[in-house]
Amino acid sequence: MAQEARKDVQALTLRIPIEDYNLLRAEAFVVDRSINEVVLAAIRTVLDRERLTQVLEYAREARRVSGREADLPTNPHRRGPKHRAAS
C-alpha cells in the first residue's frame, strides 16, 4: 500500500541559498506544515501565475486579430497559434 502511494510521486532535488532554505524552514515551523508542503505551495503559486499570464497574453493577442475568436490553449506547453501551425 505504501508503494501504491509513491507511484505518483517524483523526487526533485532543489538547490537554493541557505538563507532561502532557512526562511522556508521557519515558515514551515510557523504554519505547522512540512517543508515539502511549503515548497509545493510556493511552486504551485508560481505555476498558476505563469499559466494565467500566458492565457491572458494569448487572449490579448487573439483580440488583435480581426475576425478571429479567441481559442484559449488547453495545453500549457503549446501556446498560441504559432505552435499549433508547427504541429
Image (spheres, rainbow, N blue to C red):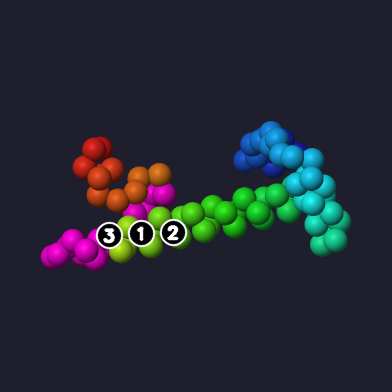
Residue at 39% in and 49% down: 75
> In the displayed structure, does residue 66 sit left or right of residue 86?
left
- The answer to the question of whether label 1 and label 3 lie on touching residues, with beta carbons closer than 8 A, is yes
Query: Label 1 belongs to which residue?
Result: 57
Residue at 24% in and 38% down: 86
Asked if residue 69 lies in the magenta stretch, the reply is: yes
> In the displayed structure, does residue 17 sit left or right of residue 30?
left
Query: Label 3 belongs to which residue?
Result: 61
The quarter of the picture where the N terminus appears is top right
Which amino acid lies under the numbered mark 2 shown in the image of this protein?
Thr
Q: Is residue 27 visible?
A: yes
Q: Tell me the distance, in whole angstroms, between the alpha carbons under discs 1 and 3.
A: 6 Å
Query: Label 2 belongs to which residue?
Result: 53
Dividing the picture into quarters, in which one does residue 62 lie?
bottom left
Which amino acid lies under the numbered mark 3 shown in the image of this protein?
Glu
Q: Nearer the viewer, residue 63 or 5?
A: 63
Q: Tell me the distance, in whole angstroms, between the alpha carbons under discs 2 and 1.
A: 6 Å
Q: Tell me the distance, in whole angstroms, between the alpha carbons under discs 3 and 2.
A: 12 Å
The quarter of the picture where the C terminus appears is top left
Q: Nearer the viewer, residue 84 or 21?
A: 21
Asked if residue 18 lies in the magenta stretch, the reply is: no
Q: Residues within 10 Å of mark 3 (few under 14, many from 20)?
A: few
Dividing the picture into quarters, in which one does residue 59 lie?
bottom left
- The answer to the question of whether label 2 and label 1 lie on touching residues, with beta carbons closer than 8 A, is yes
